[in-house]
Image (tube, grey):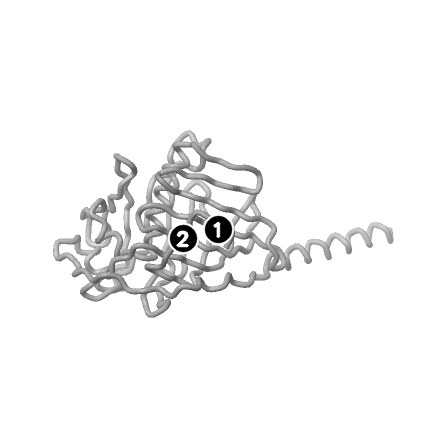
Amino acid sequence: MKIVLWILVILVVLVFLIWLGLQITPRPFPDYPEPGSPGEEMAIPSDLPHPVRCFYRSVFGEEVSEIQTAVITGRGKMRIQGIRLPVRFRFTHEAGEGYRHYIEATFYGFPILKVNEYYLDGKGRMELPFGVIEDEPKVDQGANLGLWAESVWFPSLFLTDPRVGWEAIDEVTASLVVPFGEQEERFIARFDPQSGLLTFLESMRYKGAEGDKKILWINEGRKWGEIDGHKTLVEGALVWFDEGSPWFVFKVEDARTNVDVSEYIRVKGP
């Protein structure tokens, strides 16, 4: 009886220690060393759909700045194999062209899984702890949607890039048309009727290389705020419709725009 009791006590302690390790937020990555800079100003077009025009005026006023590159740094939680792990991340963008994701999942604040993901020259490459995935058209399709969905952190791109267009749906919804090679993809953009801010971007995306059909992919904008004097999305979540709950919840802590990423976007690590 005593042995059984001790086994139960040890199991409870182990479960508690595992739970505790998953609650500890990792230290943030150091801020990107180069300060951001403003881009060329452009007036907000007058012919945008009503909710889109309200959104841009709410975020920018009457003009937007052209963004060429961005480095976004933050922390959050990511569900991996059914376990929600604390993560820290840095996403590097050549606006509208490519990105690199670096993500560290942590336990007691120490990295236990590291991910380098790339979408460069129209091709996706995922360097994961269990192998490398590349040369997969479905991965490329998903990565391209990721590229444009993450551009919500510098949404002036949706006006300054001539390949992108907005189409009206109703008073709180619009269609965002973006390029995918020689083709096009679409997002449904939903806006808050009171604040005018973007709350959801929805698209149909393949879930990895083995997916046999596209699944509704939902990008939720939970909170907008100021970073480095610019209004941007600071809290959000990503949801696959067939899963029902977010697999990634994030908070942005540093955002640098129009910095030199020509080499940084192709390296590994933070």
Q: Callout 2, which amino acid?
A: Thr
Nearer-the-camera pick, 17 or 106 = 106
Where's residue 119, x and y in %? 40, 42
Callout 1, which amino acid? Tyr
Which residue corresponds to mark 1?
102
Element at badge 2? strand
Q: Earlier in the sequence, mark 1 or mark 2?
A: 2
Of residues 22 and 44, which is closer to you in this image?
44
The residue to which callout 2 is attached is 92
Q: Secondary structure at mark 1?
A: strand
How much space separates mark 1 and mark 2, taking CA atoms? 8 Å
Q: Residue furthest right?
A: 2
In the shown orientation, is residue 207 left or right of residue 80? left
Q: Position of residue 220 (x, y in %)?
A: 37, 53
Q: State the residue at coordinates (33%, 70%).
A: 229
Q: Are marks 1 and 2 in contact (CB under 8 Å)?
A: yes
User: At 17% across and 59% down in the image, what residue appears?
Assistant: 44
